Amino acid sequence: MSAKLLEVEELSIAFRGLRGATEVLSRVSFAVAPGEIVGVVGESGSGKSVMALAIMRLLGDDGVISAGRIRFEGRDLAALGPADLRQVRGRSIGMVFQEPMSSLNPLLTVGYQLAEVLATHLRLTGVAARRRVVELLDEVGIASPAERAGAYPHQLSGGLRQRVMIAMAMACRPKLLIADEPTTALDVTIQAQILELMRRISRDAGTAILLITHDMGVIARMAERVLVVYAGQIVEDAPARALFARPAHPYTRLLLAAMPSPRRKTARLPVIPGTLPAPSRLPPGCRFHPRCPLAVDPCRASPPDMIELAAGRHTRCIRGRELLTQSVRGLEPVP
Amino acid sequence: MTDLPVAAISVGPADPGRLAYRFVRDPKACAGAAIVVLLVAIAALAPVLAPYPYDDTDLLAAWVPPSSAHWIGTDKLGRDILSRLLFGARTSLLVSVSVLGITLTVGMALGMLAGYLGGWVDSVVSRLADIVFAFPDVVFAILVAAVLGPSMLTVIVALSIVWWPGVARLTRALVLVQRNETFVEAAVVCGTPVARILVRHILPNIVPPLIVRASIGIGFIIMSEATLSLLGLGVQEPQPSWGSMIRDGLEALRTDPYLALSGSAMLAVTIIGFNLLGDGLRDLLDPKLAGSLR
């Protein structure tokens, strides 16, 4: 086993509310190796963004890590003091947000905001910083970078702003880049460009990427390994190729079936019946069983554990092995 | 006119030329600005403009009505009212600028820390502000002035104590909004130090409402100064203050109304001037109102 860059062990996160704490992430474990692109996919509200915020220690006053540990290069992130935390943020871990429209300060030029990161972490100022800013903008594929450095955010398009955000996140050559829905706010042609850019940067700089999205298409393009999150739990953890070839969890299988495809002739897109349960009202047993066409009595009785099907292939389904080895009836897409 | 739709949707930094253009087109704002400029000029040039020294007494010519020698007449000690009004502008501006400087510095610093850091810092600042808010402004200022003894410094200290919580509370509310902006979060994940986030990322975005607050607040501060002086807790003789002049004039209001009336008129015009300016600035700087001006 190679040395891990990021290790999340049995992580649980709860938000304090008026009626006590609500657990939104339950005993999540995964690891990211250096240079690896890991995709995290799940519905809105499944807890995938909370995971990213927890790693960055951005949960706010009401969110608490109720159990488990997040280790980055062997260090416990939850135990870092303010100064060490600032070192990790931006220097070792970069982050790109969903909204490129509001991620930049409207009153400062993009060049200034990039230079600020360089000054904070690399003590780079003056001409050297300016030169590096232009290099970084050039690197993320922005044409005439020297001019664009003097532009204010409102003078740039969404795609350009997201490129600037990526340049900022990558300015200090972090070992890990967390991208939370980086392309959701962009139109499809720009999406492809941004993803390609991230992949190139990851390859060139050896940066691992934790890519959080609800778009299976994005995952398919990018990820080497996929974590499927449902209702605060990882339900499947598998290499991307294997997962797309043969999902070992009914949820993954239904998600894939719900992807639009030019080859499919049916008029209506299949959907998964029901909705994601609220974190405060989880069903007993397997959290997916009310929506699962394969649910059997044991699914309703006790929550399933993660089982290892093969090296690096895990599923939280008692029928996972069946799914992998034989064709199971009941999973035909609902027309 | 063609730039207006752009002005309404633009979210970038305001173009100074366009702002100036819109300001000049607003007659009330211009009137306010004119009054304020005039007042500053009067205060600066008082020794040149005033026909007599402000403390030149002539007991034989007490309470003389307006004449060619004394345009607005004299007070009970025979001092020229016009000269004292002109010098009084100095007192009003000195007090209000000092109070504004102190309250903006203290209020913004505490408000930003409270809003950004939250937790116990917020609790301490907010409770301190609440204590001051619990008393009517002038009553609290009177209390402070009574403890410290009357003087101009007392007025400045008392009004500063009364005024900083308003600034702090406004700043805190503005920071709370900014703190949740994605670009602030983005700066945080870039490891930017707190001080830098506050000064470079948040402060520039909250300045416009504070400018408006300051320009409207200055009118109230001048009035409060006059109130304290009227009550004898403020600026002491022979230094002229519009408030104490009104007080002196009240004794002789029926027989010689010029002192009280002229002092009140100066006070009223000044406050109206600052309020018009403040309103104009608000219309100018509030992005929500920018498109609806015409």
Image (cartoon, rainbow, N blue to C red):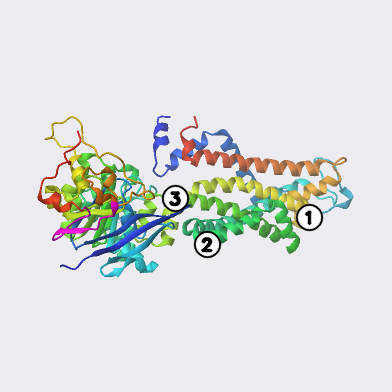
- Residue B222 lies, in percent from the top left, at 67, 49
Residue A114 or residue A201, whichever sits in front: A201
Q: Amino acid at mark 1?
A: Gly
Q: Is residue A307 magenta?
A: yes
| Mark whose residue sits in front, 3 or 2 | 2
Which residue is the site of mark 2?
Answer: B121
Residue in view at x 41 percent, y 45 percent: B13
Callout 1: SS:
loop
The mark closer to the camera, 1 or 3, is 3
Magenta-span inclusion, residue B135: no
| Residue B232: mark in rendering | 1
Residue at x-position 87% and y-position 48%: B61
For the residues labelled 3 and 2, say whether their Cβ atoms are less than 8 Å apart: no
Q: Is residue A58 visible?
A: no
Question: Mark 1–mark 3 contact, CB under 8 Å?
Answer: no
> In the drawing, does residue B261 fall left or right of residue B176?
right
Labels 3 and 2 positioned on one and the same chain: yes
Q: Position of residue A252 (x, y in %)?
A: 20, 47
Which sits in the foreground, A257 or A196? A257
